[in-house]
Amino acid sequence: MPLALLGDWRDEDLGLLTFNDLPVSQKIKKIFFWTKVILTPIIKLFFRLRKKHQEILILEYGLQKNLKIRDFLEMAKPDIGVVTAVGDIPAHVEFWSGPWAVAREKSKVVECLDSDGFAVLNFDDEAVLEMKKRTRARIITFGFGPGADVRIMNFENQFENPESYGINFKIGYGGSVVPVKLRNVFGKAEAYAASAAVCIGLIFDLNLVEIAEALQSSHSLYSGKRILKGVKETVIIEDLSDVSPLSMDEAIHVLGEFRDRRKIAVLGDMLDLGKWSIEAHEAIGRLTSTTVDLLFTVGPRGKLIAEGAREGGLFKNKILSYDTSVEAGRKLQDLLKKGDAVLITGARELRMGEVVEEVKSN
């Protein structure tokens, strides 16, 4: 967030901050980048250089081990607060006393709003919807439920035609309905994100048609979740964003929608779940037992997924567990058959992207 507030930086530079184990050449670039970050605002301030600032900043207030919402609020108090989801077992719940505590912390995003601000809330998530009692701001909700202000309808994942993989749905608001098509993404989470964006557009006086057109023309092709062509005419469902029980559950259901294809899931650990870790991983395993034909697990917690799958009835010879993503990727390439559908997801720390690189088409 401080970087976002200080300036507009290249993705290439920001990528240097993700990992510590960089080659020497990249470490030198990283040092130069940090020097630029520190000196640029000082020089601008000293010489009173004025630059036109963005009228709107969109900032993520995410919970992590050493960060709380109030840390972000001290840097930038929002005019509009958006809360997307909490879930039964939220991401990073290990660092809190329970899911209710995560919800309570996230609610501070809307508690701080002034009476002329807006709280944009997920209507379908009970913990999020409860936050409307904690804010003075005007409320606008989004979701699939019939009571949502901005409602998602007729949602479907589109997998029949490889050239038009993506999601189709309709957005309803105030008696008007518009269709939306987003390519190369999957799952209801993308529709939730789009409907939250619709709420923002409405707040800024755009009409529904303008918003739908903008979503379809400028929607990012990569949000951590995408569909790729794999080797041997396979389809790869990649989810390398922050993984939680909610997101992994959704991704497995998406894999299950592929018809007339062998379905393979490559699942890595979900981190920061604390005492809920065993329950969450075994539940994911039981879900795969009714969905996939072949299961790969990666990491120590992945073995809990494997155990849940066995308990759910998936045959032992259909489950392979590995310590690293490199091992899993090599074995996956050996076992792939023409036309398979493959889901690859897991915590970033496990480098699940290496599995994707092993099997994606060039």
Image (cartoon, helix red, strand yellow):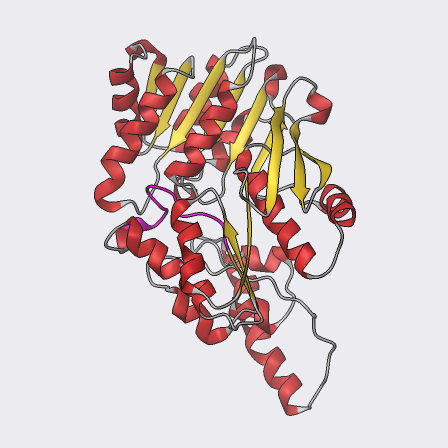
* Left or right of residue 322, residue 81 in this image: right
Query: Is residue 5 depicted above or below 11 in this figure?
Result: below
* Left or right of residue 123, residue 234 in this image: right
Q: Residue at x 45, y 26 (%)?
A: 252
Query: Is residue 223 depicted above or below 230 in this figure?
Result: below
* Left or right of residue 314, residue 121 in this image: right
Closest to the observer, 19 or 124: 124
Closest to the observer, 322 or 22: 322
* Left or right of residue 5, residue 346 in this image: left
Whether residue 89 is in magenta: the answer is yes
Q: Quadrant of residue 266?
A: top left
Q: Position of residue 352 (x, y in %)?
A: 45, 36
Query: Is residue 214 depicted above or below 309 in this figure?
Result: below
Q: Position of residue 228 (x, y in %)?
A: 62, 28
Query: Is residue 253 depicted above or below 117 in this figure?
Result: above
Q: Position of residue 37 (x, y in %)?
A: 57, 73
In the picture, the quarter occupied by the C terminus is top right
The kind of secondary structure the magenta stretch mainly shows is loop
Q: Residue at x 42, y 17 (%)?
A: 291
Q: Residue at x 42, y 33 (%)?
A: 248
Closest to the observer, 348 or 191: 191
Q: Quadrant of residue 200?
A: bottom right
Whether residue 223 is in magenta: the answer is no
Is residue 224 something one can see in this rendering? no
Q: Position of residue 103 (x, y in %)?
A: 36, 54
Span of residues in magenta: 83-93
Is residue 28 something one can see in this rendering? yes
User: Which residue of the protein is positioned furthest toward the left in this rendering?
Assistant: 275
